[in-house]
Image: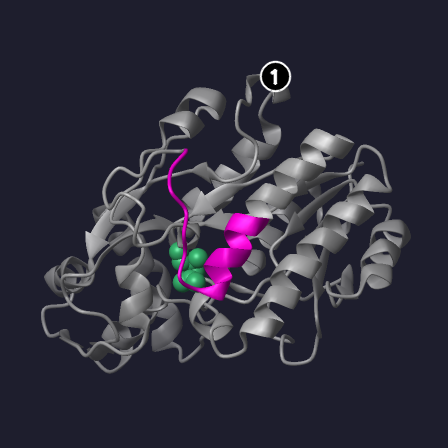
Amino acid sequence: MAKFLVTGAFGQIGTELTQALRARHGTAAVVASGRRLSGHESNPACTDPVAVLDVTDPAAVRNVLATHDVDVVYHLAARLSAVGEQDPALTWRVNMEGLRNVLEAARARPGTRVFWPSSIAAFGPETPRDAVPQDTVMRPTTMYGVTKVAGELLADYYQRRYGVDVRGVRFPGVISSQSLPGGGTTDYAVEIFYAALTSGRYTAFVRADTVLPMIYMPDCIRAARMLMDAEPARLRHRNGFNIAAMSFSAGELADAIRERLPGFRCEFVPDERQAIADSWPRSIDDRAAREEWDWAPEYDLTRMTDDMLTQLGPRLQQGSRP
Ligand code: VAH
């Protein structure tokens, strides 16, 4: 039985990825790890087998892989774009030292495979705004983005120099119904659903005309699984595959919700996160992912909005949040 380790398992993607991996491989096969367990007691991913893991501690990373005899690491622990700007040095340490420690630990255990996500945050103002090519100018303006560009290069180095089987995609903004986002610039695209179903009003922190690439969590998890299941011989790229699912403006998202909840009102009051959003592209060319491992999204704005309201509605009416 293959053993899996998810770092950042109690975060937005980690929570749902851990559950998806456990559904596919069995609970005992998937170790959920986080910097601490306290505060995550209600998180469905925070159930045995769990591990407390600070990814900036190389010995701790090596020990967890050895103790649980890990074959595959989904390395999600990271500080995101907005929160990352509050302490750039810590963001560098967590995002870069954490990744290097995981790659080093995988190198020391031949055959250990790694999934590590990059992000559209790896792009910057000089990147083409529309249909961003797989290989393009990458000069991000956030420390998070810097760590994603550097991380892609580091992961490619470990694959080329040491043969570590590490793979990754550039996730767009992720929208999820089972877990809250963790301090990113795209958090508005999740918060808006909770506000629409509770108070009926939301103040978005970006302009209405802000268009960003987004992906719904079921597609996010399927992309990770498809890439890790892909035949290595087909992969001409390795880390940082562009993937696209949908692009829409904050105003279009509010309109889609209002079509289903007529009383919903949304205002747009940009804050410091607007500058980050403005540095990212509007849409992505994901032909490489489609050609090399058959990527294809299953959720667009309409289907995602319907499912988010269907999933969240009953839960919020019962007064429960993730
Ligand atoms: C963030 N949700 O906002 C993340 C993501 C593309 C955005 O990387 O930082």
Residue 102 seen anywhere in this rendered image of the structure: yes
In the orientation shown, which residue stands out farthest toward the top? Answer: 233
Residue sitting at x 60%, y 56% = 76
Residue sitting at x 36%, y 74% = 316
In the figure, is residue 254 to the left or right of 51? left
Per the rendered image, the range of residues in magenta is 135-150
Residue sitting at x 67%, y 37% = 157
Residue sitting at x 21%, y 52% = 248
Between 230 and 281, which is closer to the camera in this rendering? 281
In the figure, is residue 43 to the left or right of 208? right
| Residue 299 x/y as whole percent | 31, 42
Amino acid marked by disc 1: Ala
| Residue 48 x/y as whole percent | 76, 62
Q: Is residue 34 above or below residue 19?
A: below
Count of numbered marks: 1
Q: Quadrant of the N terminus?
A: top right
Q: Secondary structure at mark 1?
A: helix
Determine the quadrant in which ligand 1 lies.
Answer: bottom left
| Residue 208 x/y as whole percent | 14, 66
- Whether residue 41 is in magenta: the answer is no
Residue 175 seen anywhere in this rendered image of the structure: no
Query: How was this image coloured?
Result: one colour
Dividing the picture into quarters, in which one does residue 188 lie? Answer: bottom left
Dividing the picture into quarters, in which one does residue 256 lie? Answer: bottom left
Q: Which residue is mark 1?
A: 233
Residue labelled 1 has its Cβ within 8 Å of some atom of ligand 1: no
| Residue 98 x/y as whole percent | 69, 59
For disc 1, the neighbor class at 10 Å (few under 14, some 14 to 19, many from 20) is few
Q: Is residue 11 above or below residue 242?
A: below
Between 190 and 81, which is closer to the camera in this rendering? 81
Dividing the picture into quarters, in which one does residue 167 lie? Answer: top right
